[in-house]
Amino acid sequence: MTDGVGPSGSVALIGAGNMGLALLEGWASQELTGPVSVVEPQPSQRLQHLCAEHGYALNGAAAPRDAVVLAVKPQALESGATAAAPFVGPATVVVSILAGKRISDIAAHVSAQAIVRAMPNTPAAIGRGITGAFASSATSAAQREFADALLRAVGAVEWVDDESQIDAVTAVSGSGPAYVFYFAECLAAAGVEAGLPAALAARLARATVEGAGELMRRQPQTNPSELRRRVTSPGGTTAAALEVFEAADGLAQLLRRAVAAAKRRAEELSG
Ligand SMILES: NC(=O)c1ccc[n+]([C@@H]2O[C@H](COP(=O)([O-])OP(=O)(O)OC[C@H]3O[C@@H](n4cnc5c(N)ncnc54)[C@H](OP(=O)(O)O)[C@@H]3O)[C@@H](O)[C@H]2O)c1
């Protein structure tokens, strides 16, 4: 949660790898009030240090928690659910971030009815992620609010009303950071073709993506299209490039196809 008021409630985190640890660090910085238990077979030094510093129980005794966050790899759902079982009571909400695992898959492995399926993205590691989330109908408003607070510790949260929309969320924001990195790579390669040394082109492309992203972040009320118009003088250099992007086979069409391909793959993976 924001404004220095941390989420309150007890939590068990099952799996503290990349994403689990990012969540835990978020809870620590937001001063989550309520006992935190962590189950992780191979705790890293960073994890051990974090748990010691904040009094989180690492691989300790289990008791039912308000929320159980499943953050193991999707293929480890079964063993993760076994590890989660002693933390799940009648009032527990299970929050799964497992890519491609539907509410029904989770429900088949845990005894909870209240289940939230969430799809974060990698900027969560720096507290700048965005997570799409869907709650099962058995999830109470309070449980959803607690799940929201837990996920918000690593960035923004957007709730969808239909579980199938999680596949589209995956295709837009889940996979999205890779699209942006690829854009930076392609911009650098195009710079080399335009006559720049490779290292310089790479620095220009990287700083441009970073700076444009930050500019957009600092102007939340201004649409990206408006920001674009402001730097595009009629008949100028940017306009010449945008004409290529806007062609029938340009960037918009390409992104539509790329997002559709990612969504199709997400649907296939979740069976
Ligand atoms: N990284 C992302 O950008 C991203 C984005 C969206 C969703 N997700 C989802 O987040 C989940 C975790 O991804 P990740 O990148 O954080 O994976 P990860 O780094 O492999 O973390 C998973 C952790 O869970 C541990 N684990 C395995 N079995 C366990 C068990 N039975 N009980 C407790 N812990 C167990 C693993 O330990 P071992 O290494 O010893 O097996 C590992 O430390 C995945 O389901 C993924 O789909 C990730």
Image (cartoon, rainbow, N blue to C red):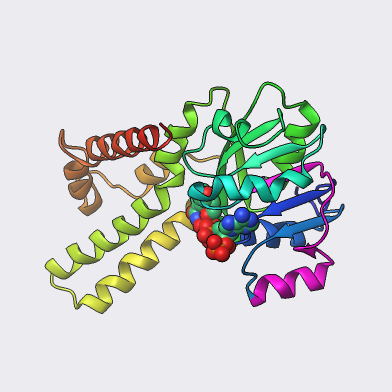
User: Which quadrant of the render holds ligand 1?
Assistant: bottom right
Residue 159 image position (x, y, % from top left): 60, 31
Q: Is residue 34 above or below residue 197?
A: above
Q: Tell which of 83 and 54 is nearer to you.
A: 83
Q: Is residue 132 left or right of residue 233?
A: right
Quadrant location, the C terminus: top left
Residue 175 place in picture, x, y as percent: 40, 47
- Looking at the picture, how far across and down is residue 170, in whole percent? 44, 40
Whether residue 120 is situated above or below residue 261 in the rendered picture: below
**Residue at (33% x, 73% y) in the render:** 203
Question: Which residue is drawn at the image coordinates 23% and 35% (left, top)?
Answer: 253
Q: Give the magenta part as a residue range.
A: 45-70
Q: Visible in this render: residue 15?
A: no
- Closer to the camera, 125 or 217? 125
- Is 21 on the left-hand or right-hand side of 149? left
Residue 224 relative to residue 145: left or right: left
Q: Nearer the viewer, residue 232 or 196?
A: 196
